Amino acid sequence: MKRWVFAAGLISIFLVAGVMSLYIGTPMDVSDLKNFKGGKVRVSGKLVDYGRAGDNLYLILRGRDGFTITALIPYQEVLKVAGPSFQFSDEVVVEGVYNPANKTLYITTILKGCHSAYYAPVKS
């Protein structure tokens, strides 16, 4: 009997953790940042453009309703992670700190959309 109670308890814990991970791990759309007060955020958006500006790599990300932000990450950090032959896919998911005053996201982590591309040229 104790084994069944223990097993049921474990199943319940894993079920709750699984449901919570769906909500915690889901990024918000760039458009949702219009009403965001600022702070740490995980966000997903369509990549419109990217390039190098000084020591930073900038990403222009657009949300489903057209709201656009600039996301910045130190260029050297991207080189460390992805190497010199990196490229981006159409959708990018990033974590960082958002400043609504200048619509800029300071990226701490690129979660999806950037990978090393052995055959693709680096965009300058």
Image (cartoon, grey):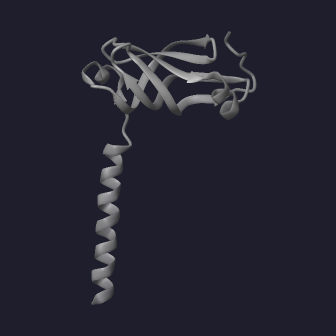
Which quarter of the image is occupied by the C terminus?
top right
Identify whether 7 is placed above or below 119.
below
Q: Is residue 61 left or right of residue 32?
A: right
Q: Position of residue 28 (x, y in %)?
A: 34, 30
Residue pushed farthest left?
Answer: 35
Identify whether 124 is placed above or below 4.
above
Query: Which of the 4 image quarters holds residue 6?
Result: bottom left
Q: Position of residue 7 (x, y in %)?
A: 33, 78
Query: Which of the 4 image quarters holds residue 1?
Result: bottom left
Identify whether 17 is placed above or below 88.
below
Q: Nearer the viewer, residue 85 or 36?
A: 36
Q: Is residue 80 left or right of residue 47?
A: right
Q: Nearer the viewer, residue 30 or 79?
A: 79
Residue at 59%, 18% (x, y): give it: 57
Q: Position of residue 10 (x, y in %)?
A: 34, 72
Residue pushed farthest bottom?
Answer: 1
Total numbered labels placed on residues in the image: 0
Residue at 38%, 33% (x, y): give it: 41
Residue at 73%, 24% (x, y): give it: 84
Residue at 31%, 61% (x, y): give it: 15
Q: Position of residue 93 (x, y in %)?
A: 46, 30
Q: Is residue 112 left or right of residue 115?
A: left
Query: Which of the 4 image quarters holds residue 81?
Result: top right
